[in-house]
Image (cartoon, helix red, strand yellow):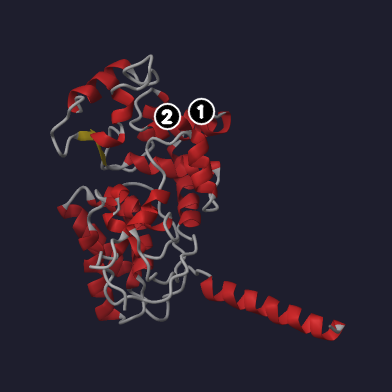
Amino acid sequence: MSVTRSCLIALVFAFALFSSSTVNALSSNYYDNTCPKAESTITKVVKKAMLNDKTVPAALLRMHFHDCFVRGCDGSVLLDSTRNNKAEKDGPPNIALHAFYVIDAVKKQIEELCPGVVSCADILALAARDVVALSGGPTWDVPKGRKDGRISKATETRQLPSPTFNISQLQQNFAQRGLSLDDLVALSGGHTLGFSHCSSFQNRIHKFDNGHDIDPTLQTSFAASLQNVCPMHNKVKNAGATMDSTTTLFDNAYYKLLMNGKSLFSSDESLLATTRAKTLVSKYAGSQDEFFKAFANSMIKMSSINGNGQEVRLDCRFTR
């Protein structure tokens, strides 16, 4: 092969890579011309939903996280199951996901404003930012331009990090998505919002290991209160505990409780297992501003995980 031809092929390949990255690139001003009222419309609908249901913030933040960790941020978690396919939202880790109606309400209004322009994946990313900000947390400029994916499989929710994971498992899970240990510690702060069912922390309060019934890292009175709410043979379907003491306020209470042996999940406790992670937990427990800054940066990074979506859905529950 001649040098000239080799160079030409190399140039074509480089241009193809550049074009692909350009097409997939996200931009903070993506809808400035095509749908300038998109963000304000999303904020308005989300705010109204929060006034009617205090569980909406935790629900939408978790929904966005679960979307991005399976196939990237492509809105695949929003798709309904069909006769021939069980979708992500019906996978075991997502059974408790709710507030999909908020995304539906946003999409309906956005479609009236700008038909076929704003993706469901972008709506979810923006709604997650809004619930954090409206709950007293930080705000950030969400990069936009995601496309909606056409594939959603319940079996792939096995890829989501488990509340029983240790630090090594968590780091590996996050690293596979281009997220660092620092991102892991910062994003774990999202646990400041919401509620957990007993099943997610049962392993820490009953038959923990051969030598302990209760995880010895749990503060004694806190463990007793959890056992009272979640007995060994719990029959109360919705029994559980709030993620921290200020469950509807986005703050740094999660880290303070973690430092005092009052975290719910094994995965939370594991953040104290390495020097670097523990240093960050201590830093965020001592400074809410530092936590907010780190959380916003890590959310931008997480929400930019490429989902390889191909369309803008007209209804977030169904492909076109």
Decide: is 73 above or below 165. Answer: below
User: Which residue type does callout 2 highlight?
Assistant: Glu
Q: Is residue 113 visible?
A: yes
- Give the residue at x 26% y 56%: 90
Residue for badge 2: 269
Badge 2 crowding class, 10 Å Cα cut-off, few under 14, some 14 to 19, many 20 or more, is many
Residue for badge 1: 273
* Secondary element at image label 2: helix
Assign the N terminus to one quadrant of the image. Answer: bottom right
Measured as percent of width and height from the top left, residue 67 is found at 38, 58
Decide: is 312 above or below 241. Answer: below
Q: CA distance from mark 2 to mark 1?
A: 8 Å
* Secondary element at image label 1: loop
Decide: is 113 above or below 70. Answer: below
Assign the C terminus to one quadrant of the image. Answer: bottom left
Measured as percent of width and height from the top left, residue 28 is found at 47, 68
- Give the residue at x 45% y 74%: 30
Q: Nearer the viewer, residue 60 or 196?
A: 196
User: Which residue type does callout 1 highlight?
Assistant: Ala
Badge 1 crowding class, 10 Å Cα cut-off, few under 14, some 14 to 19, many 20 or more, is few
Q: Nearer the viewer, residue 255 or 74?
A: 74
Quarter-of-image position of residue 40: bottom left
- Give the residue at x 32% y 28%: 203
Q: Which residue in the rendered view is the most extreme toward the front?
A: 84
Quarter-of-image position of residue 264: top left
Measured as percent of width and height from the top left, residue 276 is found at 57, 33
**Are circles 2 and 1 on residues that touch, CB within 8 Å?**
yes
Q: Nearer the viewer, residue 262 or 223?
A: 223
Q: Label for residue 107?
A: none
* In-image side of 180 versus 152 (left or right): right
